[in-house]
Image (cartoon, rainbow, N blue to C red):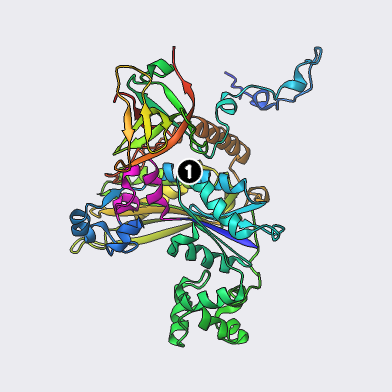
Amino acid sequence: MKLYLPSDEESTLPLVEGVKCGFPSPAEDFSDMRLNITEEIVKNPASTFYARVSGNSMINDGIGDGDILVVDKSVDPYDGCIAICYVDGEFTLKHVEKHEDHILLVPGNKKYQTIRITADNHFVIWGVVRYVIKKL
Amino acid sequence: MFALADCNNFFVSCERVFNPGLNGCPVIVLSNNDGCAVSRSNEAKALGIKMGVPLYQIRDIVEKHNVAVFSSNFALYGDMSRRVHLTLRQLAPAIEIYSIDEAFLDLRGMERTDLDAFAKKASALCLKNTGIPVSIGVAPTKTLAKIASKTCKNRPELQGGYFLYKQEEIDRILPTVPVEDIWGIGRRFSKMLHSYGVKTAAGFIQLPPDWVQKQMSITGLRTWKELQGESCIDFSDHVPPKKQICISRSFAREITDYVKLSEQVSLFTAMVCEKLRRQHSAAYQVIVFVLTNRFKANVPQQYESRLITFPVASSSTLEINRAVLKELSFLFRKGYAYKKAGVILTGIIPGNAVQLSLYDTTDRLKHARLMQVMDQVNTRIGRGTLAMATESAEGIKMNRQHLSPQYTTRWSDIPVVKSSG
């Protein structure tokens, strides 16, 4: 019986771009232009964080249980913005309404109550929500 | 001009970003295996908790003052550090990453800007983007920038940024800086300086330059000049490849079984070789070492290492692992309980400068291809996806009782926001 050692030459042939038999692809010059969803939703990578929603108090704003929030800490909170707020030991998701001497945290669901923030609360606006990722 | 941006109590600050309730409370972060306090909030420092103190020595304080304790979460700290560096990069022409919580900025060419305002603005932007408080000191030399940044930490009214350049201000600050706090003066030299009665930076620059050079070599003289505003330490925005790479860990529980020990050492070898390839280098020598617990009396003690030299510098996990395991089998003694082990690569050269040997029997090209595939798969899918059969599949066994979630690097760990109240 004769034994042959298989040659591994074939598998090591380098893949050379440009050595082709057919017509060169007219799309070749555009091959770098693929879309990356992160580019669209993350404007500032240093300050963008993700968080997950638990509950339905913002359902009228289209934000439901289990959705992923894209939060940009570098964005200044504006009146009516949807933000992750830290109130007395807990993160909560609300509209932030600025009034002259107080702040209101308004839910997007009539079943829930508005929270009035005063100087007695430990309150921080953690970050403004820019996008919501939701599975349909 | 140079700036040093130094994150305040960095590991603690990272934990606080995701746990704002900890602001104002004493917090500490422990080293690997929950051993010692390696990062402390100002409140924890005020309680007398010293840097590097073992947890068991401060149990009373921790309990009495309700100190929040965390295991180190390097996935989180690494990501937060990257975010701070990213922010700084937008502000300065060049940045040199000095450590996980420190970076130098090259501000040459920005002398016409109001650098005090710049420093304060940069600090505010880091805080806004990441939630991490950063002290930014600007000065004519790197050594003075370090001092300026430290000054920010002690004086909140500076709002995280301080431009130290006026001679009268430098003259006022240097007498308050102990020699052991000067960047570049190690423990040995500060001891030597103390023995000559030199206690502060102001005293140090009074010394004659030739004496400094004779006692402390050219590096000491450089520090001496830098403190007087003459820039001598170069700015480099690329990290030089490491001359020595080490992976070592203490085990959560002592290991007496050879197979278990070799699994861990194999894992260290795989990790250290991965690091070696990431900097495109190869190594001539590898050291493997084992340690028993020297704090335990009445048990047999061993602290031993073995050095292996390769005829041809290698970066192949397989080749290096084979050699390491062979030496480990000589090191291992039955009946000994091992507390720590490690693998160190030395004799490191650039990967493209490997001298081949006439008598070399290893198919280097094949190894290189295999390693390339392994690294690619492991970066894409996660470390350990492709591993050697000798590696521990459970990873490194570490004590991490107080570990916080990987808020920014793992989907299942991202913060949960309540929307139900």
Q: Secondary structure at mark 1?
A: helix
Residue lying at 47% horizontally and 32% vertically, measured from the top left: A128
Chain ID at mark 1: B
**Residue B44 versus residue B191 in the image, above or below:** above
- Of residue B371 and residue B401, the one placed in the foreground of this image is B401
Horizontal side, residue B317 vs residue B89: left or right? left
User: What span is colored magenta in the figure?
Assistant: B8-35
- Of residue A3 and residue A53, the one placed in the foreground of this image is A53
**Residue A101 falls within the magenta-colored stretch:** no
Residue lying at 47% horizontally and 21% vertically, measured from the top left: A133
* Quarter of the picture holding the N terminus of chain B: bottom right
The amino acid type of the residue labelled 1 equals Thr
- Of residue B293 and residue B419, the one placed in the foreground of this image is B419
* Quarter of the picture holding the C terminus of chain B: top left
Residue B288 at x, y percent in the picture:
42, 54
Residue A32 at x, y percent in the picture:
70, 25
Q: Residues within 10 Å of mark 1 (few under 14, many from 20)?
A: many
Can the viewer see residue B29?
yes
Horizontal side, residue B282 vs residue B339: left or right? right
**Residue A56 versus residue A49 in the image, above or below:** above
Q: Which residue lies under the disc numbered 1?
A: B130
Residue B215 at x, y percent in the picture:
55, 83
